[in-house]
Amino acid sequence: MEKVNIELKELPIISKIHNGITINIYPYISIENKLEIIKTYLDALFSDGSVTANYIMAEYSLILSVVNLCTNINIDHHDIITKIVFTGLWDEIKSDIKNYNDFRKELDEIIKIKRNDMSLSSNLNILILKISDFIDNISKLDLSENGIKQLTDSYKTLQDNVGELNKTLGNNNVVSKKRERSKKDVQ
């Protein structure tokens, strides 16, 4: 297939008057700006603190980042976020940015991925701690009848924990069959 050269023009900056002031809005969030906005959002959302406060801070950081990177509005005032949101200016800005809705879908997908990664990491850490405790207890193994029963119960609990982890990972078919065979062997 023969390639052709095309000339693409940037979308023009959108100018609108708000309360007697001309506001310029870039009609597209660039890749560089997306990366910066996403990093700021995730840093706020997953910082230490309450989930509610983090979510509100992340949403406000999103608004401030978009306004800062895509408009000529000075965001240095302490109450600018309230004014932007409650005057309806934020809705106007969002609607003028052609790829804002696509960007928001991308951001929401990245949040899901980040949460899944954090959940998997947490589950693996718990499993490693339990295995470590199990190995530490081997040195203290009591080979009496009661000690062997406790060891068997601990083994079953560990198998159940691994099974729960596999369910979380969505990969429980092969492992659960092995676990069922192991349970039968122990009994």
Image (cartoon, helix red, strand yellow):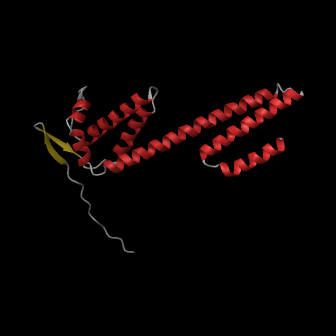
Tell me which residue sits at (83%, 44%) in the image. 185
Q: Where is residue 107 in the image (x, y as percent from the top left)?
A: 40, 44
Q: In which quarter of the image is the C terminus?
A: top right
Residue 183 or 137: which is nearer the viewer? 183
Quadrant in the rendering for residue 125: top right
Eyeballing the image, is 177 above or below 73?
below
Q: Where is residue 181 in the image (x, y as percent from the top left)?
A: 78, 48
- Residue 143 visible in rendering: no
Tell me which residue sits at (18%, 48%) in the image. 14
Left or right of residue 164: residue 83: left
Q: Quadrant of the N terminus?
A: bottom left
Q: As drawn, which residue projects farthest toward the bottom?
A: 1
Tell me which residue sits at (27%, 51%) in the image. 98
Q: As drawn, which residue projects farthest toward the right?
A: 144
Tell me which residue sits at (21%, 36%) in the image. 73
Quadrant in the rendering for residue 49: top left
Q: Position of residue 104 (x, y in %)?
A: 36, 46
Left or right of residue 114: residue 101: left
Residue 171 or 61: which is nearer the viewer? 171
- Residue 117 visible in rendering: yes
